[in-house]
Amino acid sequence: MELPAIDTQSPFRQKTLLTKDDFCEYCKENGINITIENLEEFHRLGLLYPAVRVDLGCGEFRKIYAVFNNEKEWRFVAPENIEEFKPEKVEDTPYYMTGPLTMGGDDWFKWYEPHNLVSYPASKPYFKWEKREHSYFITDMEKAGNVYELFYEKRQIIALRIIRDAIRYYSDFTPLAGDRVRRFVGEKVTPFHQFLRLYLAVEEMHDRWVRYGYQKFDEVKKEVGEEQALGEWQLDFTHAQLPAMKKEAKETLKQHKMAGTPYTGHTLV
């Protein structure tokens, strides 16, 4: 997953993305009242972009008359599965259904990227938001396939606070302060995105090493037994895992043009 290299693109992890509706709820729970209409207006003005857009696509179906659960009835079946039901009748008319939203974990884009269904609004012209409609078994392929969801990284709430404060500040002078708000937000949000890229990279690295630590402990336990496992694992942590973590942490800081000595003194088990 390669994000557009522009200041307005918010970095994110797939597992911390929220739908626009859930993002509004998350903001309200944390003291910022925001609506879908507000978010779309901020998108139109170039103040805050959705982190990612996922088109849901659609699948094709045929209506067949066959035996289901010992009774004959009409049902919708994907074309590749028709023959296994040995239908008596098959309608010629193709039907379409909007694809489901399948998300979770740090790799759920794998269902959508191969079909070019993932895009980034920050790198494209503004588009008017369409209300999401679930289209089930209709003959209009365009209507069934033109359904998408917009997602925000939950930490974009910080950028939203910056925008809120800028609007409050400049509205004290004039109600037509759009350009000044944009400049102010750009000056504040750009470094925030730079920091967030580093933060998410460190967070991902930490999670990955924690998972590896537990996997390694299980491997050691199988080899030497539970009584000796912790001691053997601590030796491996000191002489192999910790040096590798320090090396990767330094490379991450260098990659993000940050100086400093990373702290890696905690243990994983």
Image (spheres, rainbow, N blue to C red):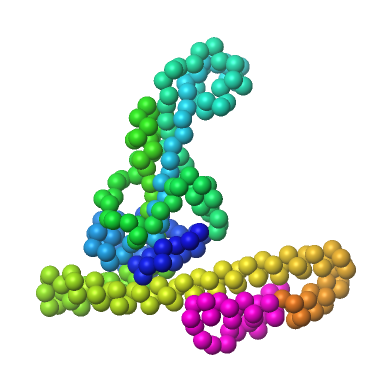
In this rendering, would 44 be left or right of 253?
A: left
Please say whether residue 16 is visible from this viewpoint. no
Where residue 167 sits, quadrant-wise, is bottom left
- Residue 183 percent across, percent down from the top left: 24, 75
Q: Quadrant of the C terminus?
A: bottom right
Where residue 166 sits, quadrant-wise, is bottom left
In this rendering, would 132 be left or right of 267?
A: left
Q: Residue shown at 60%/72% (left/top)?
A: 206
Q: Which portion, as a residue range, is magenta?
A: 242-269
In this rendering, would 78 be left or right of 220?
A: left
In this rendering, would 166 be left or right of 136?
A: left
Residue 263 falls within the magenta-colored stretch: yes
Q: Residue shown at 68%/74% (left/top)?
A: 268
Residue 261 falls within the magenta-colored stretch: yes
Where residue 3 sits, quadrant-wise, is bottom left
Q: Residue shown at 86%/72% (left/top)?
A: 227
Establish if 114 lies above or below 182. Answer: above
- Residue 75 percent across, percent down from the top left: 50, 22
State the residue in front, 166 or 239.
239
Establish if 1 lies above or below 72. Answer: below
Establish if 25 lies above or below 64. Answer: below
State the residue in front, 115 or 266.
115
Check the image and name the residue furthest to the top: 88
Please say whether residue 97 is visible from this viewpoint. yes
Q: Residue shown at 38%/28% (left/top)?
A: 138
State the residue in front, 82 or 39.
82
- Residue 44 percent across, percent down from the top left: 25, 59
Please give the count of numbered marks on the rendered protein. 0
